[in-house]
Each structure stands twice: as C-alpha cells, then as structure tokens.
Image (cartoon, rainbow, N blue to C red):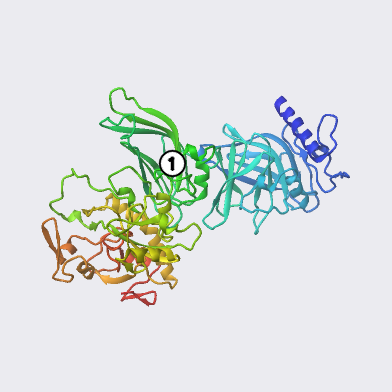
Amino acid sequence: MILMTLWLLVMTCRVCKASSESCTTDGTSLLTVRDAEAKTTQDPEIPVWKPFTDDGLCQAVAGEHGTKFKINRLGFNCESEGWSAASIEWKVFYAVTHGQPVPEQCLGTSFTDIFFLAGRKKSKLIRDTFMDHVDPSQTLNSLNHRSMNKLNFALMVTLSFGSASTIDPIRIGQGSSFFKNDWWIGGEGCKRKCFYEDTDGSEKFILQCGELCFSPTGDLDASRFDVKRVPCCWSRFTDDGQCRASAGREGTQLTQNVIGFNFRDGPWSASPASSVAFDPKFYLVTHGQPVRQRCLDISGSEISFFAGRQKSAMPGNVFMEGLDCNKTMSSLKQDCPGKLNFVFEGKLTLHGHGEGKDGASTGICLAQRGEELSQDSEPLEDQFPVHIRYPKSADKLITELTADSFPLTLIFKEYQVNIDTSGTGSGAPVEETFFVNEAGKVVVRDDVGVAARWKDSSTDVCLHPGDWIIEANSVSVDPEGILRELAKGGQLQVRVQQQGSIFKTDVFNSQDDMRNRLQSQAKPKQLQLLRQHAKGLPLLCVCGGKLQEIGLRERVHLLVEPKGENGVLTYAGRRFTVDQIIEMHAVTCDLCRKAVERTARLWTCGNGANTILHAQSYDICQQCFQTAGGSAGNGQVNGHTAAS
C-alpha cells in the first residue's frame, strides 16, 4: 500500500505539471478528485475520474429514471501462457456517463474475464477522459479500429496474469460498433509493437503494457483480447520444445526447413562426426502461416523447423532488434536481412567428437529468407532454385525397379523464368550480371546479390551464379544477341541451364525429400491458379504452361518411347510396357498424391519436364480439379474447352 501511494503521488504531480493544473496540498491533481457534477475553468469538458474506495468499491448511483446497469464482461485468451485467472491488483479510478447507474459492487473477475456493472450510454466526455494524457498510438481496439468514438464508461486499473502485470495502471473502455459493444485498452505506459499485415490486407499490431502484450483475437467476438507475456512479437516454445500448432490460412503449406552446420572449416575439421544441440526459447512465423506442434527436429548436425514460408517485414524486424548488420551472417553472404519467412531463437551447442573437443555453446537467432536455406552440401546443390539432395557417389546403385519405385521423377537442369526488369529493385546492369566465357556461353557472374535481382516475380525463382543463359526472348546461340535482349529490359523470357555437368535420373517414392519439396512449393500456387480459372481466367500450370485434359493411358503414352501404345520405358536395364506402368500406378496427382485410377481422366502440363518447377510433369486428378473450383467432364472445364 505504501508503494501504491507513492506511485499515485508521483503520477498525479506529473499530470499536474504536464497540464499546468493546480494540485492539492497533498500533490493530488484536481482533475482526478473533483466531483462528477463539478466544472472548472480549466477543463470544463473533462468529467471526473471517480476513485474506487479502499475496499475496491464504487460509489453507488441509482441512475436516472429508466436506466439500469448491465454486466459488461471483457475476456482474455491466455491459454498459451498457462494462465487460468486474471487479477485486478489495484482499482484506481472509473468514469461513467452522467445519469447512468453504478452499484457498489461494480468491478470483479471471473477466471480470465473481468466484469464491470454499470449502465451503458455513450458520451464524448468519457472518451475524452479515457484519452486524457494518452496518445492514440498508446491504445488498442478489440476490432482493430484506429479511431475512438464515444464510450460508455472507462476504468483505470492495474491488471495481472500469473506473475506478469501491466505494472502501471491501464485504461479500459467500452464503446460500440456495428450493433455490438467493442472494447479499448490503453495507457500512458503502453506502446504499439509488432506491426504486421493480416490476411485481409489490414495492418495489425500488438499493444505492450508493462509485462503484458495485448492483441485482437481476429474473430467477430469484440469482447475479448489475446494476451501473453513479453516479448510481444515472439511466440514461446513449451518446456519440451514444442510450438503452438497452427493450421495456417487456406492455401498455405507446411514445409520442413533444414539448416545444417558444417565443421570442415572449424576447430573440429578432423573430427569423424559432429552434432548439434539446441535449447529453444522463442519463435516467430509470418502471420497466417502454418506451424507444426512438434516444430523442431534435430538430426546429426541439422536442425529442422516445420512451418510455412512467406516473407514479411515483422520476422526481419524482430531478428534485427538490438543488432546491427555486423552481428549477422547469411548463408548466401548477403547484406542485412530484410523480409524473412520465420525466425527462432535459443542456445546452440556444437559438438565435435574428437579428442579434447567437448563442444561450444552460444545464444543464437536463426532465420530464413527466400524460398530455401542455402546449406553447405554437395557441389552445385545450392545453385538450384529448389533444394535437391543428390545421392552420394558411394551409395549403392539401383539395379532393379519394383512397383514401389514409381512414380519416376527425372531431375532436369534446364528451366525457364519470366523476368520483368522494369519494376523497382528488379534486374541489374547487364555488364555487372553476365559475361561470355571461353566457350562462347553467356554465364551469370559470381555475385549472389546481383544475380538474385533477376527474379521471376510469379515464382520467386531467380538466377544463380554460374547459370548458363541458353536463350533470351527466343534469341539463342548468338551470345552478343542474347546480351542485347537482356539489356532491353521489360518482360524477358529466359531459358536457363544450371552450371556443371550433373545429369542424373533418380527414382522417388512418396516420402522422397525432393519430391515433397517440389510439391510443397508448387501446390499453393497451383490451387490459386485453379481458383482463378473458375472465375474465367486461362487454365494454367504453376510453371506457366497450359494444362490439358487426357486419359490415364494417354498420359502414360507420353512416358514411353516411341510415344504411343507400342512404346516402352527403359530404365536400369529393364523395359516396361504401357500396361505394366499403369498396373504399377506410376502416375499420381501432384496435389493429393493419390494414384490416378485406370479409367480416370486427369489434367497434365503441356511443358512436360522442361521446367524445374515440376519434375517429369505436373498432373492433377479429377477430384482435386473439381474441389479447387473446376467442373470437369467431357473436355469441358467451367464452360471452356480444356487447352490442348
């Protein structure tokens, strides 16, 4: 009680000084103690904050004829913190529109809800009382409104959950909007943080008041806030290292994001084996992206984080809090991070299994930018626009194919990108990006930052150091002609081949890492394209090619040589006929991953395997096509004949 009295004395004197008001002999602001009916020459429009009694009671008021008090309940969602009850540590002041009833037992709590009993009548005076000495940037509305209108009543209390509290008193007010009551929270000690863009395109933020962080629930219930302890922008790992599971918004995809630590250049370069340990604390994923409950997995020297990928400003801002660029490092040696997909923080321990090598620990913040993390791995892997694990040269070669070896997926080096260099930040000077090598090929220079500016905005696939530019706007063979096309700017169609001489054919099952990565990256975009087609747009594949409707047997005809019923597929010394491939369920849907039935029809991309965005080809079954917005049948797709 002594501490509370001292705080009140300091607060009220500061208020007096700030507003040039007179203070009473004990230092209390006249604004905070004068009666509701009284007016002053200084602030005639500001009503009085009425103090609660020492027992936390209100001054009972019967109210004008025809009025009645109502139970005004404000709830807080705090299950993620394990809190089960809200507590009002200090009941300071309250203000109700003149003439409205207030009972003596006016304020209380019930589990994580607080309730205030009073009549409801909106007035400008209550709004002005709430906002006195408070800036709009220090407030938050339960419906994410920016402008405060009239309020029914206002409270000033110190609120706590568990061991965390607002520290200073906060203000709580009730208004109404669209036939429902909404709530406001704010205070002189509060500030907005963690700005992000919601799924509807609106800007959202979190309000920090002391040790607590408040945010709108995001649903239609205007009488609740989400609350958690600081730090506001982060989510907290559980004690056993798990995340709070989230399905993400429609069209998002959960992805395994892997970062590896290579000790070849470190003090344990001679160690035969190595491992990492990670003690997680906090994580942050772009709003609306999915997160798996068991979100962290450690295997050897690799850490996997299971979450969706979408770059946004908030993870980048949070990552850089308290840091400068000199204290960060990128796997691609790029400058300071801008937008990031996600970020997580904890204690990293590196172990070297050699004599006298016990390991070393450090606190670290890890983040991902772009489509994939670049990792030290086999040669050329990090130049691909998607992550690919090549079989080790010592691995046993596959000499026999069985039914579960299918579908076959071929890894091609060649792909096509559509680049618009007219946009801000797009493209770079041709002489800084490309050169003609001794073989007469146009090659991308060894500068990751410059190469990354030549990017396909629809797929985020960009050029990489060492890439060979085979063709630009249909100009090929002539290197000077290719450079002239690249220098023209605007829309460019560029055919690219990854550097090196790796030509491999791999056999994948449904659990293969590359297959999963390719599908997880392509699926959300393909679903969006199908929905757009349902609205009358052309029927396109994720790679930009046209989808055509064919039967399963006709699809298999495209796999064999010569193409047609009499063709065969030769692989690893064996020959497979059309009927054998159908029996082996070699063709699967790239959206649901189910085998296409013998009598079913499907949609396949006309580009076949000539793009890295999908290996072999991209196939969509009837059910997925219809679910995504199409109405298939007899070659008709939403009234349009399927492209051929």
Q: Which residue is mark 1?
A: 243
Residue closest to the far right:
41
Number of marks drawn: 1
416 to the left or right of 563: right
Compared to residue 473, the image places residue 82 above or below, namely: above
Decide which of 201, 164 is in the foreground and name it. Answer: 201
Image coords of residue 498 (percent x, y): 30, 55
Decide which of 5, 77 is in the foreground and name it. Answer: 5
Q: Quadrant of the C terminus?
A: bottom left
Compared to residue 135, the image places residue 10 above or below, namely: above
Note whether residue 462 is visible: no
Which picture quadrant has residue 163? top right
477 to the left or right of 556: right
70 to the left or right of 473: right
State the residue at coordinates (57%, 37%): 85
Which picture quadrant has residue 489? bottom left
Decide which of 575, 435 is in the foreground and name it. Answer: 435
- Residue type pointed to by label 1: Cys
Q: Secondary structure at mark 1?
A: loop
Image coords of residue 225 (percent x, y): 59, 46
Q: Quadrant of the N terminus?
A: top right
Decide which of 51, 55 is in the foreground and name it. Answer: 51
190 to the left or right of 390: right
Compared to residue 602, the image places residue 78 above or below, namely: above
Residue closest to the far front:
438
Image coords of residue 499 (percent x, y): 29, 53
Image coords of residue 109 (percent x, y): 63, 39
Note whether residue 268 is visible: yes
State the residue at coordinates (45%, 58%): 427
Q: How many residues crowd mark 1 within 10 Å: few (<14), some (14–19), many (20+)?
A: many
